[in-house]
Image (spheres, helix red, strand yellow):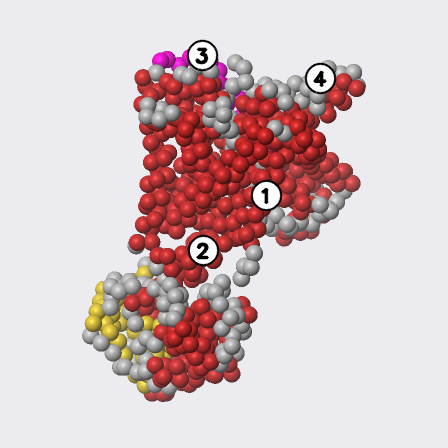
Amino acid sequence: MTRSGPGWVAAGIVAALILGPLVAVFLRAETGGRVLTSDWAAVRFTILQAVLSAVLSIALAIPVARALARRAFWGRGILITLLGAPFILPVIVAVLGLLAVFGRAGIVNTGLAWLGLPPVSIYGLQGVVLAHVFFNLPLATRIILQGWQGIPAERFRLAANLGLSGVQVARVLEWPMLRAVVPGALMVVFAICLSSFAVALTLGGGPRATTVELAIYQAFNFDFDLGRAARLAVVQLVLAGSAAAVAFWAAVPAGFGAGLGRVVRRWEAETWGARALDATWIGLAAGFLIVPLAMIFLNGVNGLTQVPGVVWRAAGVSVAIALISTLLCIALALSLAMARRGWAEVVALMGIAVSPLVIGTGLFVIVNPWIDPTRLAVPVTALVNALMALPFAMRVLAPDVAKAEADFGRLADALSLRGWARLRWLILPRLRPALGFSAGLAGALSMGDLGVVALFADPDFATLPLQMYRLMGAYRMEAAAGAGLILLALSLGIFWIFDRGGRGDVDA
Amino acid sequence: MLTLEGVVIRQDAFELRADLDVPDGARVSVIGPSGAGKTTLLNVIAGFFEPSAGRVLWDGRDISRKPPGERGISLLFQDNNLFPHLTVAQNVGLGIDPGLRLTRDQKDRVAAALERVGLAGMGARKPGQLSGGQQGRAGLARILVQGKPLILLDEPFAALGPALRAEMLGLVEDVASEIGATLLMVSHDPGDARRLGGLAILVAEGRAEPPVEVAKLLETPPPALRDYLGH
């Protein structure tokens, strides 16, 4: 069928863009020297922090998800929507919020000092894990909440009829569900944390808290040792690639799925003790999420006046990159989704297995002999951001393409709707909400990205997240807070505009 | 004339054979027990399902390899006959040009077809704003502008009440007569076949029989049909 023609082209582009840099990295790494002890330290730290982050996120998500599954309360819908927010929240903005709460002069340490206790430090392992839990506790909660809501209400009714206690209900109904859901959730969070760069860059560092991704960046920036960067990129590829493959094929939990609105009545949980317990967990989770966000807003408003002109220029660069990246991502995702073939999905998911810094390293190695890489900062950043958002866009678009074809494919065939006519009159209108949502995701992810741009930017060039990082590095925290608020507003704004545009005037 | 020549349809354990002619301008009901393969037979003629053997011919020319849109066939399915995101006029207009670039003349034809089926002035509405019967009429308006020589209907009005269904069947006949097209309709209701008159193809026990007169078939049904009718 000719319909997969554009799909082949898109698959070729994506495969070339991912495999090309990987080949370059491999070739370069072979000529490099031996593996240093600091490289091993980076590997150990990467795995350690990812394991801790995954275990803590899931362990905390279980009681929070259970509380959300069985309690109806005012603001529940808002809280569940908020649990989806960290996905499109720029990492560096969240770090700023966490610093305001847990940092040296943050709320927690101010409280400890008032009580006469020694301060806690947010830097190092604990800070990296804290930030990862901040990002992944909401995701894990949504995944596990879906598991809870997959248990039919009738089962709980039957349990009540049989007079089962809370512990017995947990053993008969909830434990089997958790055993099915938790391993996948653990793997997903573990895989995400393995590729952590921005968090490690801001809260880690030093020989004892450097991830492999951060080590790649340092090999570039401090030593300009391309051989070592390439070697680390291979290590990172093996680490994240194997974890991502397992996570994505085994579990496939859709953390941003719908259908979390239902609350099942639970007779065995109507004791005061259970109520108090659930209220505590919901309160803690909400506080952990909302307080840093509120601090971003408060400090940001105060810092807006301090924002230098470069921030606005960086904001313009970021918006431009985000728009190009969104366009690229959606064009690729749509072509691949319309091919409706297994290979198309595999190609789209390749982006999960490779990190932006690995691709960035490869691209740098490829272009370096020919052009000054810093001149390619904009196209490379837009391209890599598009590849990183591609798996998510594909996940959102592919089911809707399948549904449009299942419902109206025969009619379209009978009417000879092919090529452009099919796209224009069948696919695009049916996919409008999914296109809006995935474009919003792609745009927001690109806006907040602090990854490959760090390799390619020269001192005169910056995206907004990179500019924020530079302000933080120069201890201009108020200006950084102002820039953070601008970045947050732009990210959410881009998401909102695209998502909104997809929803307007939709007919059943 | 539509000809099925040594057609064998296989789908896992299911098998259906058809060797038959349908004369031009005929009204043909396709009847038989559910699961016998009535819809599959229609899908083979329309080009949605490839037979394992045999050919589909129109006026002696092999159309087996042609895509569904180029077989000279108009279709009305059980549901999803209209794109819900397009207006009624656009849905009908797709029957003239898949790119929907219509000349003034062609737009007039769309309006005239809508008027003919009793939807005058409703062209700007979306299908969701129409009743079930009106949606069926819009589908017929498209068949009218398509003007193709063979019309296939797959239980198109199954969701409508008896009175409305009879009315729609009358309209289908009128439309087919105006185009001068052959009409093939799958129905699980022998009453529909009787109302449509003309011929009937019995699909049962792995065979699609050549068309015979409906009245005769229903009066002296063969065993397979008798079991289905419950006499």
Write down the residue under mark 4: A119
Write down the residue under mark 3: A37
Q: Amino acid at mark 3?
A: Thr
> Circle 4: is it few (<14), some (14-19), or many (20+) Cα within 10 Å?
some
Q: Amino acid at mark 2?
A: Leu
| Mark closer to the chain start, 3 or 4 | 3
Tell me the magenta residue range: A33-52
Callouts 1 and 4 close, C-beta under 8 Å: no
Q: Could you say whether the residue bearing mark 2 is in a helix, strand or loop?
A: helix
Q: Could you say whether the residue bearing mark 3 is in a helix, strand or loop?
A: helix
Q: Residue at x 50, y 54 (%)?
A: A432
Callouts 2 and 4 close, C-beta under 8 Å: no
Q: Residue at x 30, y 72 (%)?
A: B72
Q: CA distance from mark 2 to mark 4?
A: 56 Å
Viewer-proximal residue among B132 and A215: A215
Q: CA distance from mark 3 to mark 1?
A: 45 Å
User: Can you tell which quarter of the image residue A219 is in?
Assistant: top left
Q: Residue at x 37, y 86 (%)?
A: B197
> Circle 2: is it few (<14), some (14-19), or many (20+) Cα within 10 Å?
some
Q: Amino acid at mark 1?
A: Gly
* A284 is higher (above) or lower (below) than B56: above
> Circle 1: is it few (<14), some (14-19), or many (20+) Cα within 10 Å?
some
| Mark closer to the chain start, 3 or 1 | 3
Write down the residue under mark 1: A493
| Mark closer to the chain start, 1 or 4 | 4
Specify whether disc 2 shares its chain with disc 1.
Answer: yes
Q: CA distance from mark 3 to mark 4?
A: 32 Å
